[in-house]
Amino acid sequence: MTCIEARLPDLGLSGRLVRATVWLASPGNFVERGEPLVEVTAGGVVVDIPAPASGVLTERLVAIDEQIGCDAPLATIDPEG
């Protein structure tokens, strides 16, 4: 199985950490490319992070309230699932 990592994009917040606030998909769910996976916040700004590919969400790599930086892995998706 070749999984694709969903990663935190550069949100233009000058190296600030963001906090994962709500997971919008659960492991085992099929997600479409562009569908929101997780909501993150930084300095009062709320951003939905989309799935980079369609497939089955296999694993969440970030816990709610965990602080993460740019390019951090968020989840894995099996495009063949």
Image (tube, rainbow, N blue to C red):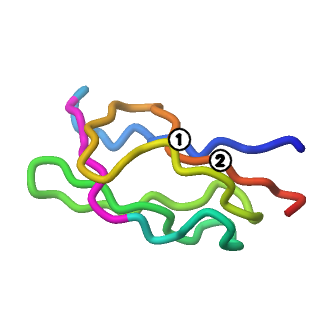
Residue 3 in percent (x, y) is at 78, 44
Residue 42's label in the rendered image is none
Residue on which disc 1 sits: 7
The residue furthest left is 43
Which quadrant would residue 67 be assigned to in this image?
A: top left
Helix, strand or loop at disc 2?
strand
Q: Which residues are magenta?
A: 16-22
The first of marks 2 and 1 along the sequence is 1
Residue on which disc 2 sits: 76
Left/right placement of residue 46 relative to residue 48 reads left
Q: How many residues crowd around disc 2 within 10 Å: few (fewer than 14), some, or many (20 or more)?
A: many
Name the one closer to the observer, 79 or 34.
79
Q: Are marks 2 and 1 in contact (CB under 8 Å)?
A: no
Q: Main secondary structure of the magenta part?
A: strand
Q: How many residues crowd around disc 1 within 10 Å: few (fewer than 14), some, or many (20 or more)?
A: some
- Residue 19 on the magenta span: yes
User: Where the N terminus falls, by quadrant?
Assistant: top right
